[in-house]
Amino acid sequence: MGSKSNRSRRYTEEFKRDAVALVRSSGKTVTEVAREIGVSAEGLRNWGTRSTADRGRRAS
């Protein structure tokens, strides 16, 4: 069997908020930050999109 689990990981809302804030404040790309914190770039991008929508703004 492989070392990766078939179950997706669950992250706390705080972790997601912090990760999105890091992307926005660091000047790094989503891919760079995702690699550094060990999450998928697609997941981190989705968290950012959801965060923007939750604040009542549309993502451009």
Image (cartoon, rainbow, N blue to C red):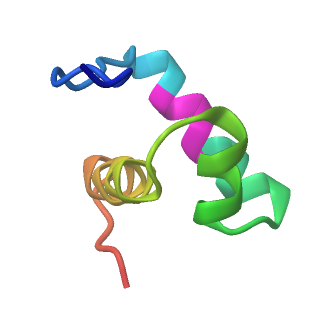
Number of marks present in the image shown: 0
Residue 39, horizontal then vertical, whole percent = 49, 39
Q: Nearer the viewer, residue 4 or 58?
A: 4
Q: Nearer the viewer, residue 33 or 49?
A: 33
Residue 15, horizontal then vertical, whole percent = 52, 21
Q: In the rendered image, which quarter contains the C terminus? A: bottom left
Q: Residue at image x 68%, y 69%?
A: 29
| Magenta residues, dominant SS class | helix
Tell which residue pokes out farthest to the left in this image. 6
Tell which residue pokes out farthest to the right in this image. 26
Residue 54, horizontal then vertical, whole percent = 27, 47
Q: Is residue 22 above or below residue 12?
A: below
Tell which residue pokes out farthest to the bottom in this image. 60
Q: Residue at image x 17%, y 20%?
A: 7
Q: Residue at image x 37%, y 57%?
A: 52
Seen in the image, is 12 located left or right of residue 10?
right
Q: In the rendered image, which quarter contains the N terminus? A: top left
Is residue 27 within the magenta segment?
Answer: no
Residue 23, horizontal then vertical, whole percent = 67, 54
Seen in the image, is 59 located left or right of residue 24?
left
Specify start and end residues of the magenta stretch as a single range. 16-20
Tell which residue pokes out farthest to the front in this image. 1
Q: Nearer the viewer, residue 43 or 19?
A: 43
Question: Quarter-wise, where is residue 2 in the image?
Answer: top left
Q: Is residue 47 above or below residue 58?
A: above
